[in-house]
Amino acid sequence: MKKILDLISDRMEEAFEACGYEKRFGKAVLSNRPDLCEYQCNGAMAAAKRYKKKPIDIANEVTNYLTGSCGNETAVFSQISAVMPGFINLCLDGGFLADYLNTMQREEKMGLEKPGHGETVIVDYGGANVAKPLHVGHLRSAVIGESIRRMGGFLGYHVIGDVHLGDWGLQMGLIIEELRERKPDLVYFQETYEGEYPLEAPFTIGELEDIYPCASAKSKEDEAFKERAQEATLRLQGGYAPYVAIWKHIMRISLEDLKKNYGNLNVHFDLWKGESDAGPYIPWLIEDLKKKGLARESQGALVVDIAQDTDSKELPPCIVQKSDGAALYATTDLGTILEREKLYQPNQYIYIADKRQELHYTQVFRVAKKAGYVKEDTPMVYIGFGTMNGKDGRPFKTRDGGVMRLEHLIADIEAAVYDRIQENRGVLKEEKDGEDALKAGTEMPEEEARKTAKMIGLAALKYGDLSNQAAKDYVFDMERFTSFTGNTGPYILYTIVRIKSILKNYQETDKGDEAALILPDAGSSERGLMLELTRYNEVMENAFAELAPHKICQYVYGLANAFNGFYRDNKILAEEDKARQAGWIRLITLTRDVLLAGIDVLGFEAPERM
């Protein structure tokens, strides 16, 4: 189904061409003066230079064609006017607008075009280190990445999400050495041991989460301990059996915990791979870079120059092997690219990580293309996200100054939402038509209240993050994020629940006419809602093209406001004109479906009542 702007542009292009001008000047855009018109065409301004005429004269010619007998018989516009210095202002015909929405309602995914055509896109997000609990620093990568994965899939791309765990670096050596100091009698540390290694891990997830920070702190003060950890890392990467056995225990226990916590965020991955999966590709990678003359020695390390003549600043070479032979993040990222090219041949790569890692990804992408591992025309996109800060403007911390675990943050926001639900229990809202879904709070059992709080809490958390541009820092404000009013996740859910309540009440009192159609608008708020709905497929497509989930947040918020304005102006269930009422029911059903599609790609869902 064509986007509304494309249909308007088609009509304008026809008019420009009929008047003797190139049709490319007929492109229409959303009006930047909604008080004057709904859409506008500025092509006369550019055509004036091409044809050596006054812009207003061209605009008048096109306007006269569209309003005169030579125009197409199918009405698209209700108002067309040329204004100085040469703009063409447009308002849509009510019948054309209603027909467009009725077509949307009949089409799969409400007429959304699928530009993906099955092309494979790798989305690399998550990036957690094993043996460590998820904390608030992991939130943005997971939430933004999940939304982009869903957006791409919705548009017909074959999107593969990879958690890409940190499971092969120095932290492994640190854990091994700390474990050796705590439990030196374990068979893994007995050089003469030749038997099978135990199936059960010598530590719990709780112990493991204590081992790593202790080891990390010790390595900063004890140089000898750090050197032993580095040696242990090298031996692990070299396949030393006892350390590989420990590593397998770490992975099994950590993955169980990570899957549970990511699941609580409604974040899912198609691949649970890590840096270690790149291991088999690294020896070949190093040799290939040498053979191609791309890798050179620098102070004992192996580096690849990535600077280009067009660079505005000096970029250091990419280190692919340390002087002791150890691999680095860049090495494993390149090995991972080799594996992805072998297994999936992606048409596009998208990486989501802290914006401070920009240099790292610039280096990796350039080496991958310079060496020919990735085709020159294959997009490799890095989305660098900002920091989630507290009200003091600094990175979000616990009250005692520590890093907050993600599961604790989720629990806190669920508790805040639950308290709000409790405030509504026993309180009937006196609103017209009996349509307010909050009245159901008096009957909500405890179990449902808890489940609802979980759903709303997740919406508050995700929307609070995604409504900001990814690259920008933002302030985490519990009170604002959990509010049922304003630009928040709970407000969007409240709007959806309100629509569900109206539809349920309508079905209980009047089955309605299944053949009913959305009618031309009868008021400004109804028209505002209809116009907002027509933007759906354009917004969804552009948001993924720009990898900008915040644009979907902007859209669903605007649509929710448009619906609530319409709701305030019209007594839907009390409307006596049954044809008009049935048309309204169709209109708000489409509104519900569009809102549900929007929050689905943002990664949360709506309850039945609040």
Image (cartoon, rainbow, N blue to C red):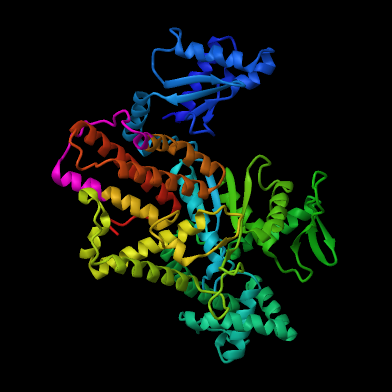
Location of residue 45 by image quarter:
top right
Q: For the point 67% across and 60% down, which residue is it?
A: 357
Residue 317 in the image, given as x and y percentages of width and height: 79, 57
Q: Quadrant of residue 106?
A: top left
Q: Is residue 18 visible?
A: yes
Residue furthest bottom as drawn? 185
* Image quarter of residue 22: top right
Q: Position of residue 353 (x, y in %)?
A: 60, 59
Residue 513 within the segment the image draws in magenta: yes
Q: Residue at the location (64% across, 77% down)?
A: 173
Tell me the magenta residue range: 501-527
Judged left or right of residue 164, residue 527 is left
Query: Would you place residue 147 above or below residue 591 in this image?
Result: below
Residue 527 vs 343, above or below: the answer is: above
Which residue is at the front of the view, 398 or 49?
A: 49
Please tell me whether residue 543 belongs to the stretch shown in magenta. no
Closer to the camera, 14 or 545?
A: 14
Task: Say if 368 sits above or below 59 in the image.
Answer: below
Residue 601 left/right relative to 509 = right
